[in-house]
Image (cartoon, grey):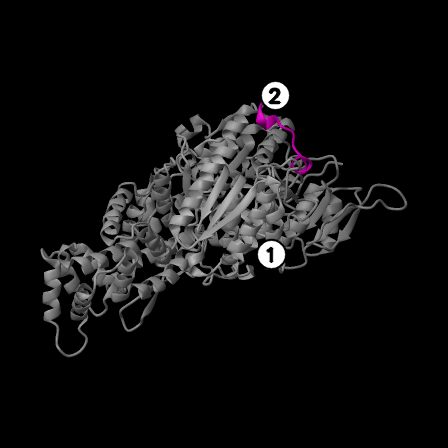
Amino acid sequence: MHVTVRDMPPTVPPVRRADGPHLVFFGVDSRRELRRRAAAAAPGVRFAPRRAWTEDPGTPRRPLLGGGPPVGLWYWRGTADDFVAQASQVLLRFIHPLIARRLPFCLGFPFGPEVLEPTSLTICTEATLDLEDIGRLLRRAGPPLPAAASCRPTPRRRPAAGPDAARLDAAQRAAVEHRQGPARVLAPAGSGKTKTLVSRVVELVDRGADPSGILLLAFNRKAAEQLEERLAALGIATTRRLVAVAEARSGRSRRPGRAASHDRPEGVHCATFNAFGYRYQRQVLGTRISLDHDGRALRGLMARSLETAGVSLAELRPRRGSDPLGAFMRALTRVRAALEPPDHVDVTIESLTATPLVTVPFAPVHGQYLRAQTATGLQSFDDQIYLALVDMLADPSHRASIQRRFDHLLVDEFQDLNGAQLALVDLLSRPHRRLFVVGDDDQLIYGWRQADPRGILEFHRRMPPEPWSATYRLGTNYRCSRAVVETGARLVGHNRVREAKDIRPRADAEDGAVRFVGAPAWSDRAAALCAFLSDEKTRLRCGWRDLAVLCRYRAQQLLVALALDEAGIPRTPALGCRLFTHRAARLLRTAIQLARSPDDVAAVDLADLLDRLVRGVGGAAIESLRTAPDPWGRLRELGAAESAAGHRPLSDLVERVETVRRAAAPASAEDLVWTVAEAFGLDALWAAEADAAAADSGGGPDGGPLEVVDSLLLLAQTYPDPEVYVRTWDRLGAAEEAHAGADALTDEASDADLVVIGTIHAAKGREYHSVVIPDYDCDVSRCTAAEVEEERRVVYVGVTRARDAALFTVDTSTGFVHPFLRELVEPPDPGEHETLSAWLAEESDPGLRRRLTDRLGEIEVLFPELVPPAPPGP
């Protein structure tokens, strides 16, 4: 019997099916009335009352006396508000299984159909999408037919050739052949993530899916381009257009009732999240966008928005040396990337008023900023996604159109998604949830960019339950050697908040090695680093470009570059490393110049030093220094004019400078740095700023002032003569200024045979034959438990960039060994060092001697307390 869905608004035509009635009634007062209306709509059909709205309806049982199973009849006894409150559970646990099982049904509600109708939404009301999904799924009364069947035949795909035609292993094939509903693929480093993702697209196309209805989202541009290339090699066309050219030129949005598949551009749509947001705004909305790459224009926009919102920074009197505008920009990131409601975000300003910490509500400022953005078209990368999402939520017709545009959604690097990106995936995959995501929670290292670990760890909380969703685990690392795989797995296994995985090397994996070398002097560690690179190039017969030095912080890159230059090893330019241009380095350089030759200190530098270091100095005095032709002379005049009674900050500064100048000349560059730091109180300032930097960056590659100063001290070891040190600083600082903003890993178009110098964060997604991680020593003492686990994942990502071998250099001068380095290896047994030493003395096999030497090196560098003291000499 064919019975249509009743009482549903005619936005989408009802679907007739041959497997029983699909009935929905609104305005029903009781279960009895529902049965009466159902009987009238489907004469001769037997109905059986059902009560559970948050359980899988299951497979109906046939009655003992024969005949077909009765049709389930569900009546909602609560109010509309009750239904709204439980909509998520009703959708996931009842509606999705009901539709997936293609069961006949009869549903009755005491309220009207408007509860399930699409409405204009905001970021804060996106949960209402669950109600909209219920309405759309019930109208369709089952999965829609493939888009290709109703619009045009699927183009024949050329047979696969090349590396992408390689066979899949059992775990990869199970994921690729996933049948229906959302799927999460947990893919550890080197497990064939990209091959699995591409093969899934091939599988969908071979099943008859329309390629133009497939959306493939990648985390960065390089990954998106790689996916396009691999799909092209497999005979699958790709596109970068969301709408057909004719429709884009007309400037009209697609009508809600129009079949989107008729106007789909040919090919799988590959995009980064930012590119998708940009294309949506340009191609669908016709928005003109001006992208601000360095953030300066947007800071100006924020300053104007503060004035318009009635927030006066002058009246707030922010502490000198602080960055109040930066605090508002960080609040904007929380709203745009993490999707925190503006009403819940406050900005705290360090103030010189009677209230040391002033709290400013961000919502009014954000409202003015959004209006200014709309007028100017000025956007950041975060804005591209956020503003596209805002429009999709606000306009139900736009939302329905973009959802119908794609039948299948595939997402790469799912663990790295922030709140806005997760919300975009959530919206685009509704209502049918044909979603296939690939990621690895063990490689989530972008928490400082607002990446939300709940996206991958709690994937199934927002999806239908099994068997209507699934998780697949890839376990074999095909990239790395046995030593690298086992070392990385041992380390990341210490994390508590993670999905359990059995990570193993391929059966024929090389042994490889993960080694550690320790020394108190940077020059010795640098020499070991260079020797390792040279030996690996010879041993592996590879190019220099197959080797990499991956630093935890950008500030470390320059010292590595200098070491490679000294050894004659070609390397990529150490660009993008903020060492001398970091504000901590600039302040230290000004203080050094003040102690050596105060008459040569630039006016702006002296004013900035006063602003950040000296309290109790009026703004007028500081501004007078900025324009003074003789700033040091002007400072002495201002100090002499201070009252003899009370606080005399300028006089005290002049006296400190004179004291340092009268003291004996520093014996070394290190002495120079520490003498100046102690004289001007820089050490206390750095400690305070380190806490603030840790809170702001959340573990990013820039680091804080302490990491910068550590690198400057290592540079002092390299150039111990104070005069040479200062000249080298100025020369290298000028070069850094000239190449500010560049990054050695962002441009891989060059085929030059150079050792890669970069950060671990920038190297994610890349691989090399062998890598060096120099002087890893991230301070996790101020981190939360979640930040500690993310930092452990940073080391895991770093070591698994190596196919064959990895080397860690360790600074032994501090007497401290980072616990993560110890977690990389098996803890030594008592007396193991003595036993292995005796064995090594008698062993003649070269391979075994190398393994014994490596293990002894691990113990000596990482567990020095377990190494017996050397016997006294004769």
- Type of amino acid under label 2: Pro
Q: Determine the image quadrant of residue 21.
A: top right
Secondary structure at badge 1 equals helix
Contact, mark 1 vs mark 2 (Cβ under 8 Å): no
Percent from the top left, x then y, of residue 634? 10, 62
Q: Residue furthest front?
A: 874
Q: Determine the image quadrant of residue 497.
A: bottom right
Percent from the top left, x then y, of residue 734? 24, 44
Of residue 298 and residue 390, the one placed in the foreground of this image is 298
| Left or right for 331, reference 738 | right
Could one spot residue 509 in this view of the protein?
yes
Asked if residue 202 is positioned above or below residue 861 in the image, the reply reads above
User: Label 2 belongs to which residue?
Assistant: 159
Percent from the top left, x then y, of residue 793? 52, 51
Q: Residue at x 68, y 54 (%)?
A: 54
The boundaries of the magenta stretch are: 161-174
Q: Determine the image quadrant of residue 289.
A: top left
Asked if residue 754 is positioned above or below residue 48 in the image, the reply reads above
127 part of magenta stretch: no
**The disc label shown at residue 647, or none:** none
Could one spot residue 220 in this view of the protein?
no
Q: Which of marks 1 and 2 is nearer the N terminus?
A: 2
- Type of amino acid under label 1: Glu
| Left or right for 88, reference 716 | right
User: Label 1 belongs to which residue?
Assistant: 834
Q: Which residue is drawn at 26% across and 54% down?
A: 586
Q: Which residue lies furthest to the bottom in this view?
A: 645
Kindly report which numbered mark, 1 or 2, lies closer to the viewer in this rendering: 1
